[in-house]
Amino acid sequence: MAALENGGNASRYAQSSTYLRRVTGAWNGYSITWNNVPGITTNNRVSIPALSDGYSPMSADVTGLVKDILNSEEGTKGFEMRLQTEQKHRSVR
C-alpha cells in the first residue's frame, strides 16, 4: 500500500475534507494561477476526510494514484490537493 501521511497540525479555521488528484497537464510552478490550472484526472482520486480536532495525524491510501502513474506513458506531473468544498475560512492544515 502507498500512503500519504502528515504529523497533524492545528488550525483556527474550519477544517475541510479534501481530494488528492493526479495532474495530467504540463504546468510551471513559477507561473501557475487559478486561471491556468493544468489538466487533472478524477480517476482514482483520494478523498481525505476533515480532521475532527485539527491535531490528529492524517493518513490516506494513494495506491490507486501511484498505480496510475506507473501505468501511464507520460509518468507523473504531480498531484493536486483541493478542498472538496471551497469556501472562505476553510483550510487544510
Image (tube, rainbow, N blue to C red):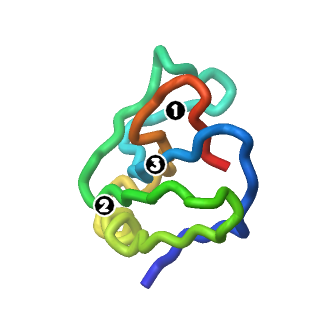
Q: Nearer the viewer, mark 1 or mark 3?
A: 3
Q: Which residue is mark 1?
A: 27
Q: Is residue 93 left or right of residue 2?
A: right
Dot 2 or dot 1: first in sequence order is: 1
Q: Amino acid at mark 3?
A: Thr
Q: Residue at 46% across / 30% down in the picture?
A: 86
Label 1 crowd bin: few (<14), some (14–19), many (20+), radius 10 Å: some
Mark 2 is surrounded, within 10 Å at the Cα level, by few (under 14), some (14 to 19) or many (20 or more) other residues, namely few
For the residue pair 1 and 30, the one nearer the viewer reads as 1
The image quarter containing residue 65 is: bottom left
Above or below, 65 relative to 3: above
Direction front: furthest residue = 53
- 22 and 49: which is toward the camera: 49
| Residue at the extreme left | 43
- The residue shown at (61%, 46%) is 92
Could you give the CA–CA distance between mark 2 and mark 1, rounded to whole angstroms?
18 Å
- Identify the residue at horizontal 58%, vertical 68% (top origin): 58
Numbered disc total: 3
The secondary element bearing badge 3 is classed as strand
Q: Is residue 71 left or right of residue 25?
A: left
Q: CA distance from mark 3 to mark 2?
A: 24 Å
Q: Position of residue 26 (x, y in %)?
A: 45, 35
Badge 1 marks a residue whose secondary structure is loop
Three-letter amino acid code of the residue under disc 2: Ser
Q: Which residue is mark 2?
A: 72
Q: Amino acid at mark 1?
A: Trp
Q: Which residue is mark 3?
A: 18
List x then y, in percent, for residue 9: 74, 58
